[in-house]
Amino acid sequence: MISAAIREGSGAEAAWLDETFAPLAPRNIYGATKLAAERLCRLVHDAHDLPVVILRTSRFFPEEDDRADEIGLSGPNTKANELLHRRLTAEDAAAAHLAALDRAPELGFGLFIVSAPTPFARTDAADLKRDAASVVARYFPDAADLYARRGWALPRSIDRVYDAGLAKRALGFRCRSDFAAVLSALREGSELPFAHDPDYVSPQQAARGAS
């Protein structure tokens, strides 16, 4: 539901996206129907006191990014970078939904961004847009070396950060996998904490192909 300007990264600093971010400006029918669905859910809650928890999840798909050629990085490298600011694992996405179901009766109504916890602070926004790799180095001094051994590249610029702090405070949920887990896997030579499957076909794509 972000605007075209945020999507294009035209701002002077990274956009800090939390539940208070406004105005929401869907740039296509996909985003417009998401926002409309949220408002309908709120109306149903208000009218019938039905417990409702809305989760705005960041990316957790296993397939290649549809802009892979534009990004110019491997799929695993891209996903690892996104755990800094706009991704969670499929397992964490499922766990967040279970947490929402469990807490819905107590909360009544809630709306939460769900994403791997970002290491960044709002005060990093300008530096993230200008030179993200240097900001990552401040938080993770060995990240560049670990990436180099894998033939990966740290992000040059980050245009948005999804802040899941409210989900931790009010929903009691925090993603288990984050960027630090990626670096730990690189140090140990163990399995990466996210799935990458370039041949994955989503149910929606399969349905379109069969029609």
Image (cartoon, rainbow, N blue to C red):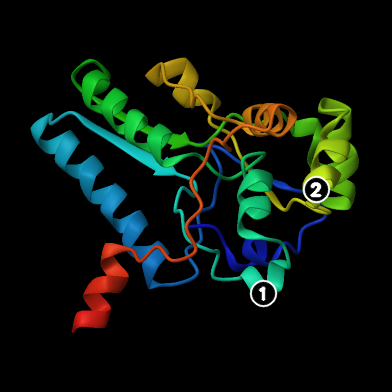
Please determine whether, in this image, residue 141 is positioned above or below residue 105.
below
Residue toward you, 117 or 160:
117
Q: How far apart, in angstroms, are the residues tagged by discs 2 and 1?
A: 17 Å
| Mark 2 surroundings within 10 Å by alpha-carbon count, few (fewer than 14), some (14 through 19), many (20 or more) | some
Name the residue: 20% across, 81% down. 210
Query: Looking at numbered disc 2 in the image, what kind of residue is underneath it?
Result: Leu
Q: Say whether disc 2 or disc 1 marks the residue closer to the N-terminus.
A: 1
- Horizontal arrangement in the rendering, residue 152 relative to residue 175 (left or right): right
Res 191 label = none
- Horizontal arrangement in the rendering, residue 182 relative to residue 72 (left or right): left
Residue 188: tell me if it is visible: yes
Residue situated furthest left in the rendering: 48
Residue situated furthest front in the rendering: 189
Residue toward you, 68 or 167:
68
Please determine whether, in this image, residue 188 is positioned above or below residue 38.
above
Name the residue: 64% across, 41% down. 85
Q: The C terminus lies in which quarter of the figure? A: bottom left
Q: Is mark 1 on a helix, strand or loop?
A: helix
Q: Position of residue 1 (x, y in %)?
A: 47, 57
Q: List the residue tagged with mark 2.
A: 154
Query: Looking at numbered disc 1 in the image, what kind of residue is underneath it?
Result: Asp
- Horizontal arrangement in the rendering, residue 157 relative to residue 55 (left or right): right
Q: List the residue tagged with mark 1.
A: 69
Residue situated furthest bottom in the rendering: 211
Name the residue: 51% across, 36% down. 115
